[in-house]
Amino acid sequence: MRMLKMDHWSIAVVLALSGPFAAGAEPAGSAPEANQHYAYATNGIADHIGSGSGAEWKLLLNKSNLGGEELQMVEVTLAPGTTVQSHTHGALEVVYVLSGTYEHEVNGKRYSLTPGMVGIVRPGDHVRHLVPKSGPAKLLIIWVPAGEAERVLRNAKGTPVDPVPEVKSPYADNSSQASTNLQ
């Protein structure tokens, strides 16, 4: 298990860099197929999944809004005192701590992670997830390649999430000025 301290921008960089190495990724420079659909911005797919079970999940990315099966991303809030028994995953699992304290045990080695820290679980590793009784932990979990969300959430349904509305750019007539002003 490796532990890293990352800020919110670093996690975006990790996601961007994982694309070329993910299963099914298009080679660099290839154009997307005309019928390929994905969301350019998203609030996620479903919220409040598993409410009342000690964990509340929000499905953020899957094939339906990502347009491919390179990865899946969820946000989960684990209740104080949560202990998830030892299990394995068939995909790489990256756990980013958003808030609270999260204990991460991989192959018998236990780590206490706080906001900005990352836990990594390789396929086949034995992992336990634990949250101290002092308070909940909110995590961002990324699985590469996709497929784990269905297994973990067992196709539970949540509340559909409203799409992110497109905004009209004040620079629609002058795209060079827009890029200058955004730098």
Image (cartoon, rainbow, N blue to C red):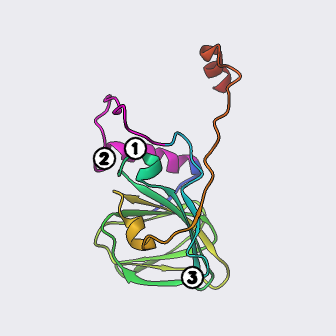
Neighbor class of circle 1 (other Cα within 10 Å; few <14, some 14-19, many 20+) is few
Q: Position of residue 99 (x, y in %)?
A: 64, 66
Report the residue marked by disc 3.
Answer: 53
Q: Looking at the picture, tell me which residue is in the foreground, 111 or 21.
A: 21
Report the residue marked by disc 1.
Answer: 17
Looking at the picture, which amino acid does disc 2 mark? Answer: Phe
Magenta stretch in the rendered image: 9-38
Count of numbered badges drawn on the protein: 3
Q: Looking at the picture, tell me which residue is in the foreground, 95 or 90.
A: 90
Q: Secondary structure at mark 2?
A: helix
For image coordinates 60% across by 51% down, the residue present is: 43
- CA gap, disc 1 to disc 2? 8 Å
**First reached walking from the N terminus: tag 1 or tag 3:** 1
Neighbor class of circle 2 (other Cα within 10 Å; few <14, some 14-19, many 20+) is few
Question: Closer to the observer: label 3 or label 2?
Answer: 3
Residue 63 appears in the rendering: yes
Q: Position of residue 91 (x, y in %)?
A: 32, 64
Would you say residue 25 sits in the magenta stretch? yes
Report the residue marked by disc 2.
Answer: 21
User: Cβ–Cβ below 8 Å for labels 1 and 3?
Assistant: no
Looking at the picture, which amino acid does disc 1 mark? Answer: Leu
**First reached walking from the N terminus: tag 3 or tag 2:** 2
